[in-house]
Amino acid sequence: MATHAADHPDFKPEEKRVIFASSLGTVFEWYDFYLYAVLAPFFAALFFPPGNQTAALLSAFAAYAAGFLVRPFGALLFGRIGDLVGRKYTFLITIVVMGASTFAVGLLPTYATVGWLAPILMVTLRLLQGLALGGEYGGAATYVAEHAPNHRRGYDTSWIQTTATLGLFLALLVIWLCRSNMDAKVFAEWGWRLPFWVSIILLAFSVYIRLKLEESPVFQRMKSEGKGSKSPLTDSFLRYPNNKYVLLALLGATAGQGVVWYTGQFYALFFIIITLKLDYVSAYTLIGLSLLIGTPFFIVFGWLSDRIGRLKIILAGCLIAAVTYFPLFAGLTHYINPGLEEFQAKTPISVTADPATCQFHIFVGPWSKFSDCDKTKDFLTKQGLSFKSADGAPGSPVVTVIGSGDSAAKIEGSDAKVLGAALAKAGYAAAPDRARINWVMAEVILVIMVIYVTMVYGPIAAFLVELFPVRIRYTSMSLPYHIGNGWFGGMLPLTATAMVAATGDIYFGLWYPIVVALMTLVIGTLFLKEVKDRDIHHNESVLDAR
């Protein structure tokens, strides 16, 4: 970083204030949004009906995903306001909506108190959070980019790119402080509310800082010249070639970036806790440390993108991630829970059932019905175990075989206690042996995955800003970003968990990010070009230049 500062002595105080104020507010907004994500496995027991752990977990992930699914609509709503009224006031509104919604989560009654009203209220607040975040990121990225000189745009906007990871780190830290300083029962009863209540303090601080900012000079000049768009949504999505570049930005950049981001930070966390059975505090510590070590690389790759280009770094990250995810996650199993790896190697498990009774569950609710097949696969999946599925005769009962040969246990039905006893007798341990955990190698793997995140995410803001003209920039860049991250990325834990439960392979969910990352690699390579040398301070775009 020192070398870079020497290369650019014109790093102005106003530029620093813009980066600091925009980034700090966005960190707090990501903190608000990711509190629920970190606590999703915990909330499964609080806000959804008991009886089927995977069903409750999928319900929790569905509520988690709801916030992501609505983000593109927030991009449309607030992107339009941002292009019509201004960047500064728009992301003042978004941070107020986010902070108030997050604080309200801390006031929610649980399922035990009000039944299905609890998850309904939770999903409503998640939708408000998603709308707010849909408007926040595009505003902050555009605002910083429009203050940055052309030769340092990747570096300046990379500070905004650190905010999502720092927000997650802050969420992990606050939850860890709460959980480590109070009894587990107290945390389950009311202590989980504290991290949400903290958001009201962060909200007040963020609003105070942002009120001191001036509007983007690029936007002010455009308005004074009367060159603003009167219909940003139409100009962005219904007029060629801008609509083509919105689609290419999604499929050739942000979709792959989104799945790499959520695999390296969220799916890895859930895999460690749910599949490998590591305790929450240790898992938070491992992930938090990887974020701390990896975060400076957002700046490194943002800086590097000013020199060699944004697109090649993003696509290289997608390629490397797709090629290495299977060995990296297998490595996490080997180093964190070697006993699980050894048990699986010597103890084959099979589930035979009438295939008509086995369902693929993603969106779970009061309408969902779970057969013995579903319950059995649910139980085995929750133990972090892979199993083979076989088709039984129509109407035949579910039969689970644990082990091989004469010593194999055959269990008919889906009784969890009977299945658990058979697994224990076969040598299954419900938690990893801490004396056998290789903490260093586990951390190295997690840092590698975070570096993948920094490769694809560090340069993406500058790349998206450079694709579109001033008059519709906020709207045009926000939609592909939030579909790529909110839909492709945000749906990853839910989809991958369902894929694992349906197939019986604890690694099968990785095919989702791998396929999406490879799709982005192909489309980005064939149809997108580098735009780092564009002057974005005028109301034209790469589209006009062509």
Image (tube, rainbow, N blue to C red):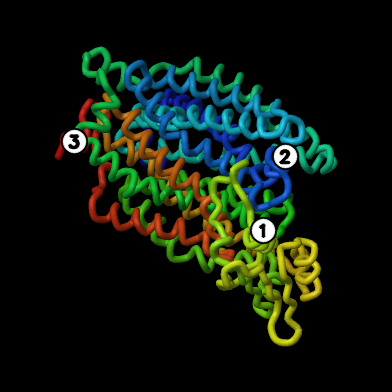
> Is 295 displayed left or right of 420 in the figure?
left
What mark, if any, has residue 46 been given in the picture?
A: 2
Image position of 99 with respect to 478: above or below: above
Q: Position of residue 206 (x, y in %)?
A: 56, 22
Q: Nearer the viewer, mark 2 or mark 1?
A: 1
Residue 516 in which image quadrant = bottom left
Which quarter of the rendering shows the C terminus? top left
Q: What kind of element bears circle 2?
A: helix
One can see residue 6 in this view: no
Residue at the (62%, 43%) spot, across then down? 60
Q: In this figure, which residue is indicated by the disc labeled 3? A: 240
Q: For the residues marked 3 and 2, what is the alpha-carbon distance in whole angstroms?
A: 48 Å
Q: CA distance from mark 1 to mark 3?
A: 50 Å
**Residue type beneath disc 3:** Tyr
The residue at which mark 1 appears reads as 375
Disc 1 residue type? Lys
**Mark 1 residue crowding within 10 angstroms, few (<14) / some (14–19) / many (20+):** many
Distance in Å between CA atoms under marks 2 and 1 = 20 Å
User: In which quadrant of the rendered view does residue 96 lie?
Assistant: top right
